[in-house]
Image (tube, rainbow, N blue to C red):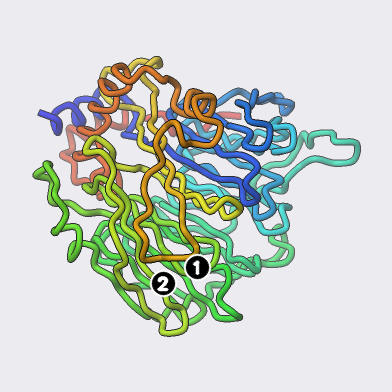
Amino acid sequence: MEDAAVEEAEVSGAGEFAPALVAAHPLGNSVAVAVGPELRVFDLKGGCAVSLSDDSGGCSHSDAIRAISFSADGALFASAGDDKLVKIWKTDSWRCIQTITSEKRVSAVAISKDGLYVTFADKFGVIWLVTVGEHGGGQVSSDNKPVSLYGHYCSIITSMKFSPDGRFIATADRDFKIRVTSFPKNPIKGAPEIQSFCLGHTEFVSSIAFTSHSGGSSFLLSGGGDSSVRLWDYITGCLLDTYEVKDKVGEQPNETEDSNLAIADLCLTNDDSLVAVAIQSLNGIMLLACDLVAKKLSFLKVITTEKSYIPTSLAYSSSADLLWTVMGASNMPNQAASQLLTRVRIIPRSQKDLSADPAVLEDSEVPHGEKLLLALQGSLDASKQEEVLAAVLAALRVSMHKMLVKKNYSEERREQRKRGRNDKKIKK
């Protein structure tokens, strides 16, 4: 029944299932949640919800946001998605300073370490670059067209990250591969060169993350639809270790019969010692110990949540040692705008004792309490949340994996999809 609903949504022209996303400011100033076309930001320093403003002359997001990212210093934030818009925000005022229109839907976005460039990937696997366009006096640049950087042609980019030193950009796709590319000092004129391919996943790669404190070494983590988390030397493309999450998830009580254990997201703690992993069928978070000296990943624990909660996105706030998790989705059959609700759960980390069992914070223990939860979740009504998130949970079990697996369609179905597509080239 759930499969049929998803199929019906695709044929009728509704967008594909879009998981809710969360991102934490690197200095702990704010946290952002995206669900559908809505971007919700909470100022953790001021203790209040943020009102977004737009000085770019562009439109607000009108379709599902697929990617969000802070810059390394937290000064900039980028959002992008199915409406083909890439919006760049200054986080001191949370005003949009630039809106770029892509010819195709956007699946990933990242900001260079120096904050001078934003890269984004369209659904055909082409990576585009645009210069962050505020000039003297805070004026917004008017003519700043994106330029093509390189491509994973005809393969959807699922994750894109800059290395901590800014020298490389890593891109992962649904065709099992990770490409690491040198990022030229002048990318508008310079030619990016392939540094390595990290090959080993046997299904789509859903998430990648660079280590940040590796003492001159070069490590990258990845997770994918093959239920594995992998550790790489990204300079050589050498696979250093693999951890199969099914070895431990199978021991966890779970009411669902869904046996797919695709990695939905992963993130590292600030000291690179822990990897938090969100898994499609797991009610909670798996923690892996990451030993970069031994080049080894090992199981640490599973932090369980309520049975109705499967995180769709993770973010780590180093300043407060908090792991932010969110569950939610948009583009589901018969979903109204008023049903764009999310659930946020926060897990504190004890630096003193990694063997201690961290617990999910109760709503009353969350920083800034109900104000934060209302701003990020969209509602504090428990019964309303339960009803909406039950539908999200059902969609997660059938859609999270299908979202990135290549589909084989009949000729008739191909024609149906062509007639309903919204990614045709924009006429100037």
Q: Which mark is residue 272?
A: 1
Q: Which residue is mark 2?
A: 290
* Mark with earlier residue (2, 1): 1
Name the residue nearer the viewer: 147 or 380: 380
Q: Where residue 294 sits: x, y (%)?
A: 41, 84
User: Picture coordinates of residue 397 (x, y %)?
Assistant: 20, 40
Q: Residue at x 60, y 70 (%)?
A: 182
Position of the C terminus, as image quadrant, is top right
- Picture layout, residue 216 above or below residue 276: below
Tags 2 and 1 in contact by the CB under 8 Å rule? Answer: yes
Q: Is residue 229 left or right of residue 105?
A: left
In this rendering, does residue 51 appear at all?
A: yes
Q: Residue at x 48, y 45 (%)?
A: 122
Relative vertical location of residue 386 with respect to residue 343 in this rendering, above or below: above
Give the percent coordinates (x, y) of residue 268: 47, 61
Which residue is at 62% across, 37% downward? 44
Q: CA distance from mark 2 to mark 1?
A: 7 Å
Secondary structure found at label 2? strand
Q: Label 1 neighbourhood size at 10 Å, few (<14), some (14-19), many (20+)?
A: some
Q: Nearer the viewer, residue 423 or 31?
A: 31
Question: Which quadrant holds residue 378?
Answer: top left
Task: Tell me, yes or no, if residue 178 can be seen here.
Answer: no
Left or right, 422 with respect to 110, comes to: left
In the rendered image, residue 36, in percent from the top left (x then y), is placed at 43, 28
